[in-house]
Image (tube, rainbow, N blue to C red):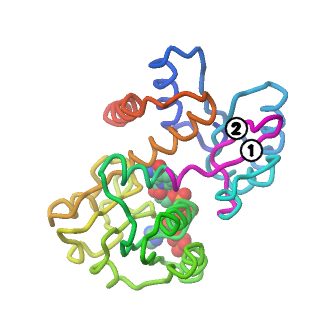
Amino acid sequence: MIGSPVEHSLSPVIHNAAFASLGLDWGYFAVVVPDGEVLRAVAAMRSLRLAGMSVTMPHKETAAVAVDVVTSRADRLGAVNCVSWRGTQIEGDSTDGAGFLDSLRVDHAWDPTGARTVVVGAGGAARAVVAALADAGAREVGVLNRTPERAARAAALAGSRGRTVTADAVEGADLVVNATPIGMGPDTRLPVDPDRLGSGQVVADLVYDPLETPLLAAARARGAVPVTGIGMLVHQAAHAFRAWTGEDPPVEVMSAAVVAALTAR
Ligand code: NAP
């Protein structure tokens, strides 16, 4: 993994647990790479014959131009979080959106087809979620964000189904997603008015530390289905694992490892 900072990343825990579980003699390491060094990090992958790399902040956009080729979804987002080999070429992909959809479909047997959805936030994670929800057939993808211009740019990723919305849209949504850092760590704020949440809704928080964020606690208390950010974290890693090793990822092992690491913090 390349990024800065990377010290607190849970990705080494997830991938190393998966390698050990399958008996693969592989290792996953987080390396601090400063700005301006991404091109050389990709070149190092080629010369060292590394099987792959994860890319995290602040390098996701730079990596999209540093690799040889990008997948169509990475191209659309202008961001790469997973780098692997395609023949002799180094390919950049974005697995966050697919990971998010898996957290809904696989972990909660909930499909966004035909759903009215609201995504709070318009940064990298929100953009991946917006594009994935539109591709998955959501009827409407509303974006609610502090900075309206960024909301409009994110909503455009959903094409005709994307639009910017105001806070009242949360009330009629089938799915509400928090893609801001609000509620992380000691932050006890909520990204939406909890009284707009209720039964029949699915409420997903991309924040996974704490495991039960103030938003998820409020959603649960009002009868909504809470979805933690662990699912997206693990499933996006599972997509990377499959791309690098060609093996089926041991998702339950990966999930247990990350929950244990978070609980021990
Ligand atoms: P980002 O690119 O920095 O975007 C952050 C977004 O949150 C922006 O839209 C920003 O609004 C909004 N925001 C930040 N602080 C705010 C505040 N105090 N009030 C209102 N809005 C605020 O970050 P990101 O990479 O998209 O990540 C967003 C969150 O998702 C983080 O908590 C991250 O840990 C989490 N995440 C989780 C996963 C996972 O696998 N579970 C994956 C990726 C990210 P403006 O546009 O107005 O600045």
In this view, 84 is above or below 125: above
Q: Which one is in front, 250 or 259?
A: 250
Q: Position of residue 262 (x, y in %)?
A: 36, 37
Residue shown at 47% from the left, 76% from the top: 143
| Badge 2: residue crowd in 10 Å (few <14, some 14–19, many ≥20) | many
Q: Amino acid at mark 1?
A: Glu
Checking the image for residue 84, the label placed there is 2
Magenta-span inclusion, residue 87:
yes
Quadrant assignment, res 216:
bottom left
Residue shown at 52% from the left, 36% from the top: 11
The magenta-colored residue range is 77-98
Q: How many marks?
A: 2
Q: Which one is in front, 33 or 14?
A: 14
In this view, 3 is above or below 164: above
Quadrant assignment, res 104:
bottom left
| Residue 129 showing in the rendered view | yes
Q: Which residue is mark 1?
A: 91
Tell me, yes or no, whether the two marked residues, 1 and 2, touch with CB atoms within 8 Å: yes
* First reached walking from the N terminus: tag 1 or tag 2: 2
Label 1: which secondary element? strand
Q: Quadrant of the C terminus?
A: top left
Query: 218 left or right of 237?
Result: left
Q: Position of residue 160 (x, y in %)?
A: 55, 82
